[in-house]
Image (cartoon, helix red, strand yellow):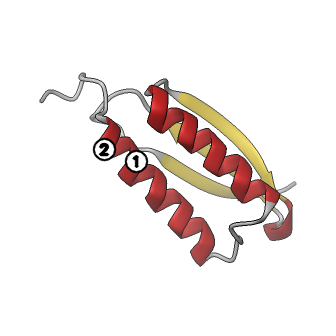
Amino acid sequence: MSGSQPKPKADRLREGLEILRKLQEVGLGATDPGFQEVKAAISAWVNTGEPAQHKIILARLERVAEIMLPRRAMNTATCVLKVIQ
């Protein structure tokens, strides 16, 4: 499969779950509103395959999660935490 192909749903699910797992590792609880917002964004991406970008405030961590959810198989979903300025 070439990198310009759409990312398969299984890959979107795996990458999305990895982002959620890492957010929990840094102390964001599954019931935290920011976690729920990230989870909803990832869920929509997994189901539709539509690329998306989100900036979600994680108030408890005093961070903003900048999430990139790509369409193409060659790109990996990312989540970067930045300090709230």
Query: Marks 2 and 1, how far apart in space?
Result: 5 Å
The quadrant of the image that shows the N terminus is top left
Element class at badge 2: helix
Q: Residue 3 sits in which quadrant?
A: top left
How crowded is the residue under tag 2: few (<14 C-alpha within 10 Å), some, or many (20+)?
few
Residue 65 percent coordinates (x, y): 68, 52
Q: In this view, does 57 lie to the left or right of 45?
A: right
Indicate the quadrant where residue 84 lies.
Answer: bottom right
x then y, percent, for residue 83? 77, 60
Q: Which residue lies furthest to the left in this view?
A: 1
Which residue is at a point 71% across and 54% down the rendered structure image? 36
Q: Are marks 2 and 1 in contact (CB under 8 Å)?
A: yes
For label 1, the residue is 13
Foreground residue among 80 and 25: 25
Residue at 72% x, 47% y is: 37
Q: In this view, does 34 lie above or below 60?
A: above
Q: Tell me if 44 is positioned left or right of 31 in this view.
A: left
- Near-viewer residue (30 or 81): 30
Q: What residue type is labelled 2?
A: Ala
| Circle on res. 10 | 2
Instruction: Determine the residue positioned at 40% across, 47% down.
Output: 13
- Residue 64 visible at all: no
Tell me if mark 1 has few (under 14), some (14-19) or many (20+) residues whose alpha carbon lies within 10 angstroms of its own: some
Q: Is mark 1 on a helix, strand or loop?
A: helix
Q: Position of residue 10 (x, y in %)?
A: 30, 44
